[in-house]
Image (tube, helix red, strand yellow):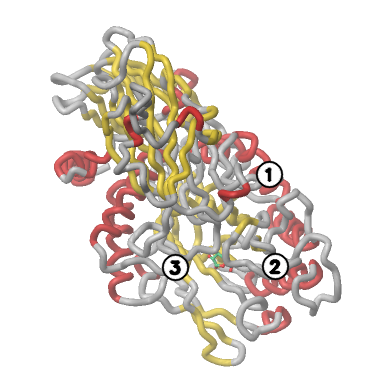
Amino acid sequence: MNRLTKSLLIAIYLCAASTGMLAASANLIANIPGRTHISLDGTWRAIIDPYETGMGARFYENAKPKTPRDLVEYDFDTSAILNVPGDWNSQRAELFFYEGSIWYKKSFSYHKRDHARVFVYFGAANYKALIYLNGQKLGEHEGGFTPFNFEVTGQIREGDNFLVVEVNDQRKLENVPGTVTDFWNYGGLTRDVSLIEVPETFIEDYWVQLAKGSLNEVEGWVKLNGVSGPQQIVAEIPEAGIKQPVTTDDKGYGHFRFPANLTLWSPENPKLYQVMLTGAGDSVGEQIGFRNVETRGSRIFLNGKPVFLRGISLHEEAPFRGGRAFSEEDDQILLNWAKELGCNFVRLAHYPHNEKMIRLADRLGLMVWSEVPIYWETAWENPATLKNAQEQLHDLIARDHNRASVVLWSVANETPINAARLAFLQALIAQARTLDSTRLITAALNHYEHTSPNTVVLSDPLAPSLDVVGLNEYLGWYGSERPEDCDHLQWSLPNEKPLIVSEFGGGAPFGSHGDSDTRWTEEYQANLYERQINMLRRIPTLAGMSPWVLMDFHSPRRLLPGVQDYRNRKGLFSDQGERKQAFYVLQRFYREVKEAPRQAGKTD
Ligand code: GCU
């Protein structure tokens, strides 16, 4: 990490402090699982507030009538119950389509500890959250898929406390994502909520990864919170006999780089090391993998070797019960299905998935494409929308920068070509490169056209700004082509960059059968996969794929009765875990690719 990047990182922290971006919430505390935490998960009281009465009525005071004459027109403790974590849509039938405000309240008892600072941490809240403790406003957060925390050391009481959160998931064009998505707008406190206890000076965040372009040097930094003057920290990898002293500056920032002979993380051998950081009165540790990912020409290299990304796209939707996935169990089922397909890669669409999913990908040996929800139409010219997108990207990278599995940051999915969009996305790309020079930057593009009956050309002015080009194409499903037309189609693509076909696919409810020319049948879907795979393997720059999609998922845009019923049916699995014929087509191809890896630049 050169001096420039280091000073830029500090600058980002400092300017973040000055721009009030942090006014919304404190710096993200890294590695929450590795901290002392008290869960506030479980049942919460909830007031469904369609006309946003709560702010005027000061619901955040959680008031009770003091005298029989008092007029208080709400009462959390006799209101509905919602589970946290969990979206509200899949918990109560009357909330399935609900978009608006719901006020949550959690009463809890707390015992203060000397010299401890306390933060309240949210894994995510969709979409906009206003947070109050004991009637006092802590702050607010916007964006449904990234974590946030507030310091409450000064507000939390010995004994009884109550946390009130207004969550509103109304869709607006200036939001990120905007108003129209092909996925359900699951509202609520969708991930864990907990109290975090740390010492007065604590290790707020750290970066411990292989240095860019190196296979045997670790580079990183540590950031202390609550420091007064330089501190001594030790970065340790006990299994590798590494004990590296680091001196922080008076702002609590310390940089390090040291040689390390480590077993590198890969899908075949997802080796993780226990890494500890200790000093300044605090100690925190976690399992971290070390790997290097880069591109050379049109190939992707992992640890210096060419790799083909055998992938699948998936939504963060729970199998069997539906709703937003949030638990280790949900994630384990989804990623095990991907492994069963023969995947070494998953595209987590179209927003940051829960942290457990990423840590599980580390353990299972699945490379990850992680994406911020710049999806379809967005308010490209609105500076607040750009700032919001930058905050979501910043927080995603802040949460997952120590995850070996994450190899790609995606800044957008299927966005229209115009100058404002280009500037918007290039600003995000520049920010991602500043925050993390060690991972690859991509986006899912979908602007292609026929230049002759047999030639399809992808043309998008954003492509030159990417390390890896993502392509979403639905030949054989949307548009006039039939699956058979893929047999003679040749793609013309930017040939100096690796290509990941980030989406292709077709819909079929499980158990719907007919001839392969009949839409909505498993036979049609399987035939489409056969034809697509044969077409794509003819592309010299093909470095991977993540067909659309692992499992059928809820979508407010899929309305065909008896076929879709508010679900997108392009899954290779039904939502009940049934494998469709196309599952076996892709599994067979991945088995073949695994046994006979594609030669550099060679088509099959
Ligand atoms: C798009 C989009 C997905 C969507 C899919 C589909 O490409 O990226 O979010 O679900 O196509 O149409 O099924």
Q: Secondary structure at mark 1?
A: loop
Residue named by callout 2: 507
- Image coordinates of residue 15 in percent, x first then y, are 16, 44
Please report contact status of discs 2 and 3: CB closer than 8 Å, yes or no: no
C-alpha distance separating marks 3 and 1? 28 Å
Which residue is label 3 attached to? 376
* The N terminus, quarter of image: top left
Residue 558: x %, y % from top left = 62, 67
Query: Which residue is depicted at the point 73% across and 81% down?
Result: 484
Question: Which is nearer the N-term, disc 3 or disc 1?
Answer: 1
Q: Are marks 3 and 1 in contact (CB under 8 Å)?
A: no
At label 1, the amino acid type is: Arg
562 to 73, vertically: above or below: below
Quadrant showing the C terminus: bottom right
Q: Residues within 10 Å of mark 1 (few under 14, many from 20)?
A: few
Q: Residues within 10 Å of mark 2 (few under 14, many from 20)?
A: many
| In front of the other: 169 or 71 | 71
Residue 332, horizontal then vertical, whole percent: 65, 38
Tell me the element at label 3. Answer: loop
Pointer 2 or 3: first along the chain: 3
Mark 2, mark 1: which one is toward the viewer?
Answer: 1
The one of 298 and 547 positioned closer to us in this rendering: 547
In the image, 603: left or right of 226? right
Answer few, some or many: residues within 10 Å of disc 3's Cα (few below 14, many 20 plus, some between 14 and 19): some
Amino acid at dot 2 = Gly
| Separation of marks 2 and 1 at Cα, in angstroms | 21 Å
Residue placed farthest to the bottom in the image?
A: 452
